[in-house]
């Protein structure tokens, strides 16, 4: 049995430049949506944008949103992990993974990148997403860690007992024609009790936390600024865009 307090060897990440697009490629559009975006509307937009990226008619895009309270079921979701099916709307999702919660106070970043311009390696792409989130947490003096047996970013919680740890960020992606969509969800200050209606990501042995739960009270714009800087460190330059349309805003 592996002691969860013993550091787990982390898989080697490629150099930070490994997921940068080829020299001369346009920067990734970076759009922040105001208000709460309905989930079905977000999926419809991502499907269309990913197809346009694959066709070469749209630039890559990172789209930052918040959703109203809801649960999503990934392609590996086990029905028994939906503990309160009537609590919030439940959406079947084409992303990988199991059940997760989205809601106000959680920053969801939908990442639409062309791996053909970068590297056709989905596992390394997921590792790069984890590195992005870990770098973001580090900027807030939070140590995020990978786990080789479960995707996402975790923090140790010795205050909860030996071996305790909580998930602070989830990752669920889909790839079509080597273009990624769906993405990551970072818990900034969501209502953590809302996670009680599911077994988050199918992991019952550990809990869920947030920046606020760990004592870091920050605004969403502060988080967004750090997310952008850390994304650029891993994936390359971005350009601000006007909401989901992806048109340049400055």
Image: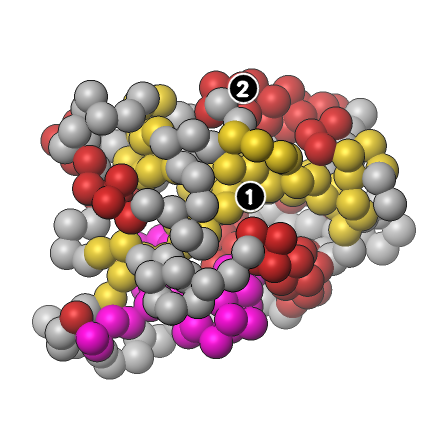
**Position of 34 relative to 217 (above/below):** above
Q: Split into 4 quadrants, where in the image is the C terminus? A: top right
Number of the label disc, if any, that sits on residue 45? none
Q: Does residue 184 appear to the left or right of 56 in the view shown?
A: left
Q: Which residue is at 64% across, 20% downward?
A: 48
- Percent position (x, y) of residue 146? 38, 65
Q: Which residue is at 22% across, 26% downward?
A: 87
- Percent position (x, y) of residue 141? 48, 76
- The residue closer to the viewer here, 87 or 90, is 87
Q: Is residue 217 magenta?
A: no
Q: Does residue 187 appear to the left or right of 204 in the view shown?
A: right
Q: Does residue 227 appear to the left or right of 36 in the view shown?
A: right
- Percent position (x, y) of residue 111? 59, 41
Q: Which residue is at 44% across, 39% downward?
A: 104
Q: Which residue is mark 2?
A: 41
Q: Split into 4 quadrants, where in the image is the N terminus? A: bottom left
Task: Please say whether residue 164 is visible from this viewpoint.
Answer: yes
Task: Please say whether residue 56 is visible from this viewpoint.
Answer: no
- The residue closer to the viewer here, 45 or 249, is 249
Total numbered badges shown on the rendered structure: 2
Q: Which residue is mark 1?
A: 109
- Percent position (x, y) of residue 39? 47, 24
Q: Does residue 182 appear to the left or right of 197 in the view shown?
A: right
- The residue closer to the viewer here, 160 or 25, is 160
Q: Which residues are magenta?
A: 131-159
For numbered disc 2, what is the local secondary structure?
Answer: helix
């Amino acid at each position: 049995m592996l002691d969860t307090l013993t550091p787990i060897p982390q898989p080697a990440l490629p150099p930070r430049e490994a997921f940068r697009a080829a020299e001369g490629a346009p920067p990734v559009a970076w759009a922040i949506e105001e208000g709460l975006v309905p989930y079905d509307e977000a999926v419809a937009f991502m499907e269309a944008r990913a197809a346009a990226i694959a066709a070469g008619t749209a630039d890559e895009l990172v789209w930052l949103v918040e959703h109203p309270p809801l649960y999503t079921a990934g392609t590996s979701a086990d029905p028994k992990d939906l503990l309160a099916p009537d609590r919030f709307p439940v959406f079947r999702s084409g992303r990988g993974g199991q059940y997760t919660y989205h809601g106000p106070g959680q920053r969801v970043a939908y990442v639409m990148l062309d791996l053909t311009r970068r590297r056709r390696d989905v596992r390394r792409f997921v590792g790069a997403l984890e590195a992005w989130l870990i770098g973001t947490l580090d900027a807030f003096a939070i140590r995020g860690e990978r786990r080789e047996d479960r995707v996402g970013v975790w923090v140790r919680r010795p205050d909860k007992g030996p071996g305790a740890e909580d998930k602070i960020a989830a990752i669920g992606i889909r790839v079509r024609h080597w273009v990624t969509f769906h993405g990551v969800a970072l818990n900034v200050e969501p209502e953590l009790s809302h996670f009680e209606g599911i077994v988050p990501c199918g992991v019952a042995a550990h809990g869920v936390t947030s920046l606020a739960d760990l004592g870091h009270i920050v605004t969403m714009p502060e988080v967004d600024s750090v997310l952008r800087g850390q994304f650029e460190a891993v994936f390359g330059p971005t350009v601000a865009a006007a909401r989901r349309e992806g048109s340049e805003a400055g």
